[in-house]
Amino acid sequence: MSLNFILKHENNSKGAVLLFHGLTGSPFELKKYGQFLYSNGYDVYAECLPGHGEKFEEIYTIKYQDWLNFAYTRFDILKKQYDKVFVSGLCLGAVLALAVGIKFKNDVAGIIALSTTLFLDGWRLPWYKCFMPVAFATIVRFYYSYPECEPHGVKNIKTRNAVKKLLAKGDVGMNDFPMTGFFELLKLSAFVRKNLKNLISPILIIHSKDDDLTSLKSAKVVYKNISSEDKEYIILYDSYHMVLYDNEKEFVFNKAIEFIENHNKVLEKRKEAVLCI
Amino acid sequence: MYINLLYCLTAFFLAILFTFRKYITNKLQDGLKISAFISSIAAVLLLYIIFSFIMAIIVPNIINKAFFFVFGISPFIIGKIAKYEKVNFYSIIQLICIIASGLYVLSI
């Protein structure tokens, strides 16, 4: 399931974009997004998060600190190579992007948070999700995994069927959401929420109104609690959770590159001003 | 008296669910049904925890109170220390705790 990709220009790259995929996903879900950013002059890096590799069982043993360390390390490496590093992610990846923004507050050129999952309160989750906290806190969390099911986070029927086929093959992501993964995601979410006030980087938040996994509450909490002066919040009305390949994917791609280009220019001007001084 | 009976029934029902968990999940096959079944274990476990704390409040003897308090928090302690690699071992410990609490309530 390792579908890591690095899209690097020979020379004259405008900067780097570090991408993080979602829970039980893989870099495959970021491929088209990455290619789009690459075609606009940016080097793009996307790697499998810990616990999402070849062995399915690894997700049961992973801790949220492993994801954090992974994200910090990858950003640190890129920061040494590029002047401008943007961070973007989907679902769990968006939470990690926020965590990177909190840790490296002065170094992150910008954050694009897509379907940020701080709360598991989407309409797809069954009524018995109310027992989740008990399951999380007890041994039951090791027994419990919620199966990937309709609508697979996708509103577009054609794309949904394609996703179903790919998931059936097991090549691009896991067929279940293990409860231990959810548990660690919520712990990571609690850590990020606690530190949101330390986030000062420019940020673009994109969230679907009908997100099936996490409601708009997550995006609103981020928008309200961060200290960034430069923040933008866009609500999508014709997509579910997987905004990168749903009905409004082109809109998302365009907004993302618009945000990156604008902040790239600002950083260039600032750099020139510093050089003049 | 009724609460003793309810506690005992909950404990033994939970013990049955824990014991036959693997068998039932293999039988169910469908992922959504399995997740609903596991949720039902979580629901009964919640009931068991609530009853344990109620027992800890209403029983007169301090030792009995301490025992029921320990039974009530045991799922959280076991949940905290459990590791995926040794999940069967910790499941057995949880099961023993539940059965012991059921027998204990009968003995008082």
Image (cartoon, helix red, strand yellow):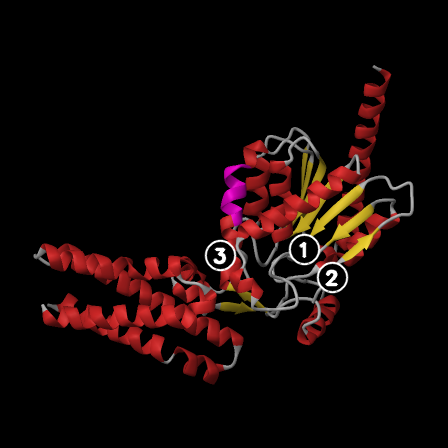
In the figure, residue B77 lies in which quadrant? bottom left
Chain to which mark 2 belongs: A
Residue at horizontal 45 percent and vertical 66 percent from the top: A142
Q: Is A12 left or right of A259, judged from the image as shown?
A: right
Q: Mark 2 — residue? A: A28
Between the residue at mark 2 and the residue at mark 1, the CA separation in whole angstroms equals 8 Å
Residue at horizontal 54 percent and vertical 58 percent from the top: A62
Residue A183's label in the rendered image is: 3
* Residue A110 in view of the camera: yes
Q: Mark 1 — residue? A: A21
The majority secondary structure of the magenta stretch comes to helix
Chain to which mark 1 belongs: A
Q: In front here: B32 or A87? A: A87
Badges 3 and 1: C-beta atoms under 8 Å apart?
A: no
Q: In front here: B66 or A190? A: B66
Q: Give the mark nearest the N terminus, 2 or 3.
A: 2
In the figure, residue A226 lies in which quadrant? top right
Residue at horizontal 21 percent and vertical 57 percent from the top: B69
Q: What's the residue type where badge 2 is placed?
A: Phe
Between the residue at mark 3 and the residue at mark 1, the CA separation in whole angstroms equals 17 Å
Q: Quadrant of the C terminus of chain A?
A: top right
Q: From the viewer's perspective, is residue A70 above or below residue A2?
A: above
Between the residue at mark 2 and the residue at mark 3, the CA separation in whole angstroms equals 24 Å
Marks 2 & 1 on one chain: yes
Badges 2 and 1: C-beta atoms under 8 Å apart?
A: yes
Q: What's the residue type where badge 1 is placed?
A: His
